[in-house]
Image (tube, rainbow, N blue to C red):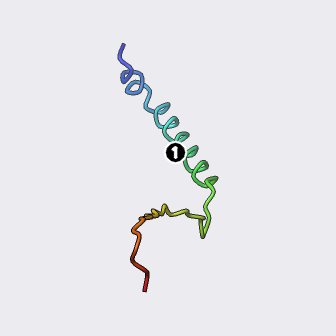
Amino acid sequence: MSPSRTFILRPVATSLLMAGILLAGIVAYTQLPVSALPEVAFPTIQVVTFYPGPVPK
């Protein structure tokens, strides 16, 4: 017996299962924390060179 056969023979159960998954997804989505101004740390690169003699102007 293939797994899809169960879903084909029981369309009401399949519809209720899909409605339950959809409802659980909506509830989970509303529980996600969202910040208006999130703290973001941008990566930076620092280059240091040693060149004796010249002076900065």
| Count of numbered tags | 1
Furthest-front residue in this view = 53
Q: Quadrant of the C terminus?
A: bottom left
Q: Residues within 10 Å of mark 1 (few under 14, many from 20)?
A: few
Residue at (48%, 63%) from the top-left corner? 44
Residue at (60%, 70%) from the top-left corner? 37
Q: Position of residue 23 (x, y in %)?
A: 56, 46
Position of 26 relative to 44 (above/below): above
Position of 33 relative to 52 (above/below): above
Q: Position of residue 4 (x, y in %)?
A: 36, 24
Apparent side of residue 29 relative to residue 45 in the rendered image (left or right): right
- The one nearer the camera, 27 or 15, is 27
Q: Quadrant of residue 36?
A: bottom right
Q: Position of residue 25 (x, y in %)?
A: 55, 46
Circle 1: element type: helix
Furthest-top residue in this view = 1
Furthest-bottom residue in this view = 57
Position of 57 relative to 14 (above/below): below
Q: Quadrant of residue 32?
A: bottom right
Apparent side of residue 30 relative to residue 11 in the rendered image (left or right): right
Residue at (48%, 61%) from the top-left corner? 43
Residue at (62%, 64%) from the top-left corner? 35
Residue named by callout 1: 22
Position of 32 relative to 41 (above/below): above
* Amino acid, disc 1: Leu
- The one nearer the camera, 36 or 3, is 36
Q: Quadrant of the N terminus?
A: top left
